[in-house]
Image (spheres, rainbow, N blue to C red):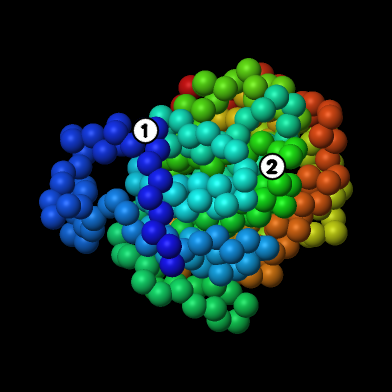
Amino acid sequence: MKKNTYSFLDGEDYFDDSHWFEEDGLLWDNEEDEDEEPLGEIDLPDFLGNNNIQDLINMYLIRSVSGKEDNLRDYVAHALILNNIPFLEDEEGNIYRLSDNRPILSAHLDQVDTRKRLTTVSISGGSIIGDANLGADDKNGVWIVLNLVIADKGRTLNFIFSTGEEIGGIGARFLASKRAKTLKTCPYCLVFDRKGNGDIIGVENYYCSQDLQADCANIGLEYGYTPTNGVWSDADTFRDHVACVNLSCGYQSAHTDQEHTSIAGIKNALAYGQALINGLQANKKYKIAGASAINDKWRWTK
Ligand SMILES: [Zn+2]
């Protein structure tokens, strides 16, 4: 175990007095909360890498409810630093790298607040289970994107670890508004945030046109992935600028204390992600869904 002591550019804003107060040298949330506990420094495990499931379990044990993603963000930042992958952080706490013309991988750092705190995680019958919500939505996506980015050694991929997805895609919308010009140059965006083990959410949610979905489905044959439709995600934001798909990453029963992850499912999702990076056309700009289709019922907010 190693104590991480990163300070981020937006630290002062985040720890604004209106939201937090200090007592006994620790920062506390002002909101009434029965099981409130101090924020600030905690012992964070090191990222092991090499597609290690222990990293995923370690992430489950780092609580990161929307607006309080700091500890998971520290963990991800530390993993990137250890692997010499450059990244930026913005005012909303998104961690990202965005260069022109590169494919984008995306997952969200925050988890829903199900009140009960996770204290134990175990493996049973090929699944990872806990005594409360794991936050596998979307730590599974974070684990997949981290492993893919590290395998790439920072050479060819963009990535986005967003904040506040569960409370309206706050981080993604902020980032998209600031970096729209770069997003528009990127060939495609893979969002890893879908439940289950074989879903490609694309055309039916107006995340992309047929070209990207068809290529994803073709490569997905070997991995059991097929197109369908799904609920809202950060892809609803990024799709205005870049063709997106939202892909299953192995969790079930999200937002409940019964949430669980199929180990075979998440490993398959990681392998599929790697196959997509290898197989999609990185020098082709896939088409976004048409403007008329985008202005539709799926939009969270204009
Ligand atoms: Zn999610």
Image coords of residue 268 (percent x, y)? 73, 62
Judged left or right of residue 133, residue 54 is right
Where is the N terminus found, in terms of image quarters? bottom left
Image coords of residue 221 (percent x, y)? 85, 55
Look at the picture and state if 201 lies above or below 208. below
Q: Which mark is residue 272?
A: none
Per the model, the C-alpha gap separating discs 2 and 1 is: 24 Å
Image coords of residue 214 (percent x, y)? 83, 40
Image coords of residue 276 (percent x, y)? 79, 47
Check disc 1: other Cα within 10 Å, few if <14, some if 14-19, many if 20+.
Answer: few
Residue tagged by mark 1? 10
Tell which residue pokes out farthest to the bottom in this image: 125
Look at the picture and state if 273 lies above or below 263. above
For the point 48% across and 34% down, which residue is it?
89
The reply to whether dot 2 and dot 1 touch (C-beta < 8 Å) is no
Residue 32: tell me if it is visible.
no
Taking depth in this image into account, of 247 and 70 the one nearest to the observer is 70
Judged left or right of residue 219, residue 20 is left
For the point 44% across and 49% down, which residue is it?
74
Q: Which mark is residue 154?
A: 2
N-terminal label among 2 and 1: 1
Q: Of helix, strand and loop, which one carries label 2? A: loop
Q: Residue flagged by tag 2: what amino acid is it? A: Gly
Check disc 2: other Cα within 10 Å, few if <14, some if 14-19, many if 20+.
Answer: some
